[in-house]
Image (cartoon, coloured by chain):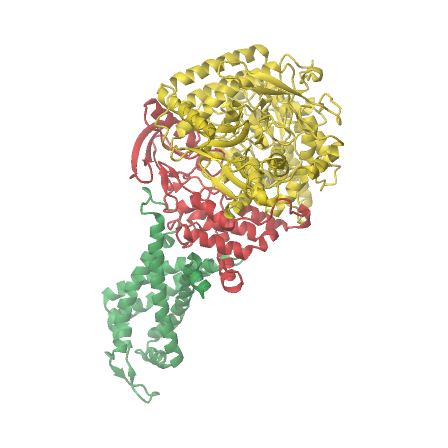
Chain colours: A green, B yellow, C red
Amino acid sequence: MNWFIRFLTSSIGQKLIMSLTGLFLISFLAVHLLGNLQLLAGDEGEAFNKYAYFMTNNPLIKITSYGLYAFILLHTIQGIILWKTNRDARGGSDYAVGTATASFSSRHMAALGTIILVFLIIHMGQFWFKMKMGWVSMIEYADYDHPVKNLYEPVEAAFTNPIFVVFYVASMVVIGLHLSHGFQSAFQTLGLNHKKYTPLIKTVGIAYSILVPLGFAIIPIWMFLKDTMNL
Amino acid sequence: MKLESKEPKGELAEKWTNYRSTLDLVAPNNKRRIEVIVVGTGLAGASAAATLGELGYNVKCFTFHDSPRRAHSIAAQGGINAAKNYQNDGDSVYRLFYDTIKGGDYRSRESNVHRLAEASRNIIDQAVAQGVPFAREYGGLLANRSFGGVQVSRTFYARGQTGQQLLLGAYQSLSRQISLGNVTMYNRHEMLDLVKIDGKARGIIARNLLTGELERHAAHCVVLGTGGYGNVFYLSTNAMGSNVTAAWRAVHRGALMANPCYTQIHPTCIPQSGDYQSKLTLMSESLRNDGRVWVPKNLEDAKAIREGRKTALDIPEQDRDYYLERRYPAFGNLVPRDVASRAAKIECDKGHGVVKTGKAVYLDFAAAFERYGESEALSKGLKNASKEKIIELGRGVIKAKYGNLFQMYEKITGEDPYIMPMKIYPAVHYTMGGLWVDYNLETNVPGLFALGEANFSDHGANRLGASALMQGLADGYFVIPYTIGQFLSNEIRTPKIDPNDPAFAEAEKAVDERLSKMVNIKGNQSVESFHRRLGKIMWEYCGMARNAEGLKKARKMIRELRDEFWSDVFIPGSTDEFNPELEKAARVADFLELGEVFAVDALQREESCGGHFREEYQTPEGEALRRDDEFAYVSAWEWKGFNEDPVLHKEELEFENVELKTRSYK
Amino acid sequence: MKLTLKVWRQKSGDHKGYFETHNVVAEEHMSFLEMMDVLNQQMIEEKKTPVAFEHDCREGICGSCNMVIDGRPHGPQTGTTTCQLHMRTFKDGDVIVIEPWRSAAFPVIKDLVVDRSSFDRIIQAGGYISVNTGQAQDANAIPIEKDVALDAFDAATCIGCGACVAACPNSSAMLFTSAKVAHLNSLPQGELEASRRVQAMVHQMDAEGFGKCSNTGACEAECPKEISIDNIALMNRQYIASMVGSDTAV
């Protein structure tokens, strides 16, 4: 397996890890968004809570979720290693005048990633951890023979607080920026480029990095507006 | 000294084949023990070092650059000739041989040139196998274009970067040998002396340019592929670092300098824009395939253009003088370089020149835009296309062919050549002269070989376009690997050469003293200023037209300048550090000696031939007047010392296969 | 035109560097390096040590010159080497900051001169086709599709100047390495060694201490020969395929 270690520790191998984990996280975002949009159903969180119940109890999804945690961790650790070695490769001294030929996102992937990590910790502490620890109330639904965790409650609590709303919306902007480079970069690293198709990948990437974070951002804004304006 | 060319006897076409099969060989087990020094990593040096490494010799290769890939062969634009006859237009080895001899104005050695023509075909095969991306047709086969001085299409090219691609091919082969351990590469090392033991070349003294340390490198023989000396003119198309030092140091050790006055002035260069100018840039000769050269017929128009009152576009067709087409109807704009250059000078001297300095002519593509545009419109099925549309289409075709050259022109001059005709003027480009070598490419110093532009052998008094790449690679890939065996087969019993030999100590000391002397002058003038002044003298008196009076004057002026250099040059820093000014100084000091021999040679050769035009010897129409009965020989000069006259040795040229004719391109 | 230059001075790799300010009078038709010649001539007249910088062909092809001008390798004009940059790009009164390539794999030798021998070693690792002189068949025996030959040529126009490394925030040499891989691996002559070549060259590039590509595209934007990062994608693809899918393990 010597070649395998050599492969994964080579510059391209390390980038491959970033690319594959990144693509997985990108696809997770879409699934996550689809689930979350049920918060807008206007049913006092019934659909959302049932969805949350399904997600936490289906064995297949449970296994996938462990994969997700592992990939987040791997993406983070590999990212830190790349950031460090790339900084060393630069040789310590920066140019007196900053270069501006690369896009903002591509130059600040590590910084954007760090902000996203902080967001993730707060985000998971706020909802996932509370739920895991059972610090949420239970609710009963007619078509279920047992009560389920009412995750909607802490979500509503958070998203009616203007501080959290701003925090979430700002974080989505950061995720959008991270994605705007990450999406097509992942394809470039895999070598999936083609004179005819690469422009399409780029367009899809930009669309994805605008629409998905926007979708997430609408939820707190909508819930906040609904609360304050009594819609 | 009797100069023996060592040409084999027999039929011209058979000479090389027969000679090659009877040459002495060195057995593989002996090759491993034999060391060869190669100086220079251009086409000749890199190809030689790579090939000798492949053969199993122990090669040490030197360049003053930071990498072997930077040698100035990289800048060759137009292409490389080969007698492949892929175009079925009547080309053959003999025709390439004949064109080269004729183009060289019958001042080169028949057998060498024929060998070159034979090897030309192998070079293309070799380069393609190395992955050199030559231009191709849609059918996937190699494309050709035509070049000045010939009537067939035999030039292979890679857009305007043929030299780059061929050099990278050689560099890659060299890199492979370095990785295999057959070649040891010494970057940033400059050869500053040749070491001779018992009369044979046995090593060099090289300066490590990073530390300033002098190093002794010993070997069984030394191969120089160090290029030409065009920079003696200061302004030339050569790279800033191109120099004569390695060859000139060999001359100090007894090698002969042959035909130094044969200099090629390239007709299509971007004119000088000011006194600050550090070098001139070539526009590939291939442009003459589609561009038409002209000047305004009326002196008033030329004056108006020079004063900025008119532009080329204001001159109507009937007031333009397409002087090459007028004077040389058979070849037109494709006459050889020496002819085209001189014609431009004549027009400018008469007052028809077009830039502020009066030293430029037009190279106009308007006719080509129209011609290509029309055929493009036809092939696109555009009937009744407007004139603008046709010209636009034509510009597209020209862009595909020469886009990078047009872009380069615009970058340098700030003028758009798609609208304004290019302005061009001749500039020093290549030196046909060089170290005297025999058929084995060995100088008169046993064990010292010279390849490519560094030797004198193949181009006579004028080189045809796209032949420099051919010669450098032929020498390196296909000649020296064989002929070096002739010398080395007698050296298999010679043990490793000892760098502690007194000869090395003596040479090292001499180099050290020379450099220290230079640095310690601490005068008031920069190295650059001396170089510029030397260049002015050379261009004024030893340039496109020379005469006895001027040459005598030049010699005197060069001597005076040299004395001034040795008493008033200022070199900052010391000898034991990275010191680019010192490097330059040592090179300029050598140019100051070579320049004198150049003038002496030009004065002695009382005829006009190729790149050497003596005003006293011209036909009534102003064409070069060769004097075959008196000057059909190679002039090989022996250096005798600072204030001595160099001594002439002659090698008579024998022409058995071609008849000496007055070159006519009419 | 009157200019103020802030030039990086560094006696050697062991010394600390600093900026030195000079005033120079230039003409707009001068090339950037001719303007530097004026500066050096001025310094020599004042008996000072001139600024060491690398240059040779001065026509944009040898790859010697390497200055970061106002934060951009080879200056503000795209597709142009330092030597082909002309002063008409600047204005009277401009302040110009001139620095060397900055990368751990290109240590400074003196002032603006850096050591780029790492590039040579990457080529030595596999940037060639293994064919000895004299072994070649007739050149037209291998037809190559015109577009393939053109793409190979475009990649092969790399001049090895190192602007890609200088421009890259990570000092990655992927553009340089991939240009050679793409040139040779896309030609039929180079196909046999393709796996070995891509592995050997990538591993050598890593060993030299260059950073890892994060696809910023800065290299492509600053490359004086405008070599495309499509070559990097090609190299990624071939490297991954050869490491995972081929028998070759260099």
Q: Quadrant of residue A205?
A: bottom left
Q: Position of residue B659 (x, y in %)?
A: 75, 24
Q: Quadrant of residue B453?
A: top right
Q: Position of residue B101 (x, y in %)?
A: 69, 27
Quarter that holds the C terminus of chain B = top right
Residue farthest to the top? B549
Nearest to the observer: residue B50 or residue B522: B50
> Is residue B190 in view?
yes
Nearest to the observer: residue B571 or residue B539: B571
Left or right: A186 as drawn, with respect to B289: left
Quarter that holds the N terminus of chain B = top right
B80 above or below B231? below
> Is residue B421 in view?
no
A187 above or below B341? below
Q: Residue at x 38, y 77 (%)?
A: A63
Q: Position of residue C22 (x, y in %)?
A: 31, 30
